[in-house]
Image (tube, coloured by chain):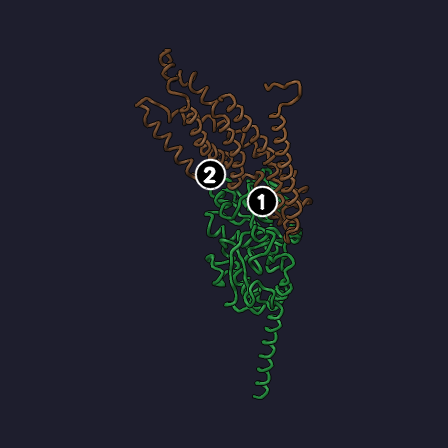
Amino acid sequence: MTKTNAAGKTRRQIYEDRLRRRSMLIAGGSTLAVFLAVVILVPMAPGWDRVKASFFNWEVFAKTFPKLLEAFKLDVAIFLWSAPAIVILGLLVALARDTRNPALFPLRILGAAYTDIFRGVPVVLTVYLIGFGIPGLGLPRPWNSPYIWGSLALILTYSAYVAEIFRSGIESVHTSQRAAAASLGLSDADSMRFVILPQAIRRVIPAQMNMFIALQKDVALLSFIGPVEIFRQAGVFKSLLANFTPYVGAAVIFLAVTIPATRYADYLMAKQNRERS
Amino acid sequence: MFHKVIAATALTALTTSAAFAAGHCADGKTLTEGTLTIATGNPAYYPWIMDDAPESGKGFEAAVAYAVAEEMGFGADKVTWVRSSFDQAIQPGPKDFDFNLQQFSITEEREKMVDFSSAYYAAPMAILASAEAKDTAATVDALKALKWGAMGGTTAVPVLMDTIGPDDMPLLYGDNADVTAAMQAGQIDAALFDLPTALYLSAVVVEGSSVIGQFPADRTDNPDRFGLLLEEGNALKACVDEAIAALTESGKLAAIEAEWLQETTGVPLIK
């Protein structure tokens, strides 16, 4: 801690206080200026009234918001049953890519091919191909449900990303730890389970949080193959009312979930950085 | 002989003055002076526009567009086609078309945001049922139990919810192709379309399907009436309305309908 002498603050502290006050004033001033510019200048644009009626129509917003909220429950449900599957599959793929036993080499190839393919194809294409393609093979109901196959498409795609993040976590644990575990008599499986993975998973949690925030938004892609979740519901209202406000309502609902989640991920990341340094 | 000449001259004078009058109506109100820019969907579907080529004038809406243009004093060579999605048609700001036709249903809510011409076609809603479900009785009670689908961006959705009220939440799709894909994948039993589209899909796209019923016009509080979509407050609306009124009166609209849209009387009404 800095020492304060009897005469009060040191000259250096006074100088630093002044600097801090000054930068806070500038930050506050510039924020206010930008805010005022947006609030005053945007409505002065000639098309503002039309844009306002079409995107920020309070009447439409109030009418459609409760139904959008209702439809959002479906998004949450799809997210909740997909997320655990993604964690498990992602971890399995990461482990498959990390096998060192020569006999299991095909597993490594498969793991690599899997991540290459599913990371390389846009999610919406995977949703279409799996969501319409597999049920088209002639599965009976309820096994051809778009919920099942759409969720599977999300799970396959996101597992590929999650697997790569897990793998980077596993590789970030220094090889000397494997050697140490082996010298203690732990088998390969045990050293992975008790030594490597606990550290690896902890290190990648913030990065995985970001994947799940992205997943939360991509759940809306399932609307392409039928489920009436929030994005489709907003689209229906948009068409019926010829007004884009329902999309703004949907965006508000998404933000209400993703902003806290993002802040939490940031917090975890900052905490981890503090612990490391 | 002399009489004939007079009559012919009079007739020519009459037609030219009519053309002039129409020309005056649209004068200076179109996007580009002297040409009429018409928008349609991308892709545009049979039987509304044949082979996704509106320039050919083939298909119901392509023919209507050229007839309206002619009535307003624009020859076929003065018509330019552009493509637009539904969203582009309703977004605020200047439009890149004079009018847009792609089976837009006229509704009160939409009228608040854009302008519609008077209707050029009134389509009953009809049910396309998959091969497995095509023997379902055309009664509301029997239909409730089916697994329903529809295109999300159409007035089929409120009609479906209000008049049938399916037991299961219907699945909604982005366009007709996706609805039929879902039907072929066995994910839905039935879907609601306007009648001409339903007839086309059952005949050409979805194997084994059939149109099992149509809603009588008085069943829905407003039957689907298709209008040309114009930018809100577009001065051209009066001219377009005038042209459609003239086409209706002369029977030309009915002739175009008879030429391009299938006979729709064979489909039973839903009780």
* Amino acid type for the residue under numbered disc 2: Val
Q: Residue at x 55, y 55 (%)?
A: B102
Q: In terms of sequence position, does the residue under pointer 1 or pointer 2 come before the other?
A: 2
Residue type highlighted by circle 1: Gly
Q: Is residue B224 left or right of residue A167?
A: right
How far across and how far down the image is residue A84, in percent? 50, 26
Q: Residues within 10 Å of mark 2 (few under 14, many from 20)?
A: some
- Secondary structure of the residue carrying tag 1 is helix
Q: Give the Cα separation between the discs numbered 1 and 2.
A: 20 Å
Chain B painted colour: green
Q: Which residue is mark 1?
A: A235
Find numbered disc 2 in the image and state the secondary structure of the residue it sits on: helix
Q: Which chain is brown?
A: A
Q: Chain of mark 2?
A: A
User: Percent x, y for residue B101?
Assistant: 56, 57
Toward the top, the furthest residue is: A184
What residue does disc 2 label? Answer: A123
Q: Nearer the viewer, mark 1 or mark 2?
A: 2
Residue B271: tell me if it is visible. Answer: no
Tell me: residue A148, above or below residue B246. above
Kindly identify which numbered label has been placed on residue A78. none
Residue B211 in picture, x, y percent from top left? 53, 50
Q: Identify whether B24 is placed above or below A84.
A: below
Query: Marks 1 and 2: same chain?
Result: yes
* As drawn, A60 above or below B98: above
- Closest to the observer, A106 or B57: A106
Protein chain holding label 1? A
